[in-house]
Image (cartoon, rainbow, N blue to C red):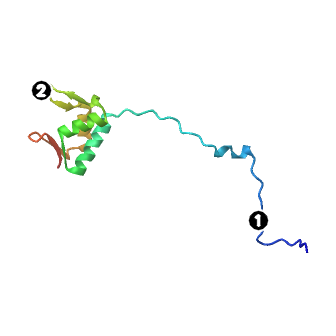
Amino acid sequence: MGSSRKSKHSLQLRAIPKWENLKFMLYKPKEKRTAVEPTAQDVAEWMVKEIRFTGTLYQADAIDYVKRNFGEQFVFVNENGNASLSKEVKKAFRKLHRGRIAWDRDGFLWAWT
């Protein structure tokens, strides 16, 4: 009755690995990242991308967006009492677009040329 034959479908049990061998599988949280402060270059890159995508960027819209998303350190009030982008942003912006974007004085906007 008792057959000592092995079935070809029998399960083979493996030894359970020891705890020491599982250390590599433990969850390790990533190190906390500190917030990186935006730069004038970041603002200028956003402006160029926005103008490339939409064709134009109004100064008032740019100032509102920059204040909300990059910080007020990139905006100042000029001698005429108008909000303007910082000189660092304008310098980075000019360097990035290399003459492909023009300022329209009458419309207070930048446009792709």
Q: Position of residue 107 (x, y in %)?
A: 10, 42
Is 61 placed left or right of 69 in the picture?
left
Residue at position x 89%, y 71% from top?
Answer: 4
Residue at position x 25%, y 42% from top?
Answer: 47
Residue at position x 28%, y 35% from top?
Answer: 68
Return the residue at label 2.
80
Q: Position of residue 36 (x, y in %)?
A: 40, 34
Q: Quadrant of the N terminus?
A: bottom right
Q: Residues within 10 Å of mark 2 (few under 14, many from 20)?
A: few
Provide the secondary structure element on which disc 1 rests.
loop
Q: In the current view of this chain or complex, which residue is farthest to the front?
A: 1
Work out whether residue 40 or residue 32 is closer to the camera in this orientation and state it.
32
Number of disc labels: 2
Is 25 placed left or right of 8 in the picture?
left
Q: Residues within 10 Å of mark 1 (few under 14, many from 20)?
A: few
Provide the secondary structure element on which disc 2 rests.
loop
Return the residue at label 1.
11
Residue at position x 12%, y 26% from top?
Answer: 80
Identify residue type, mark 2.
Answer: Asn
Is 22 placed left or right of 2 in the picture?
left
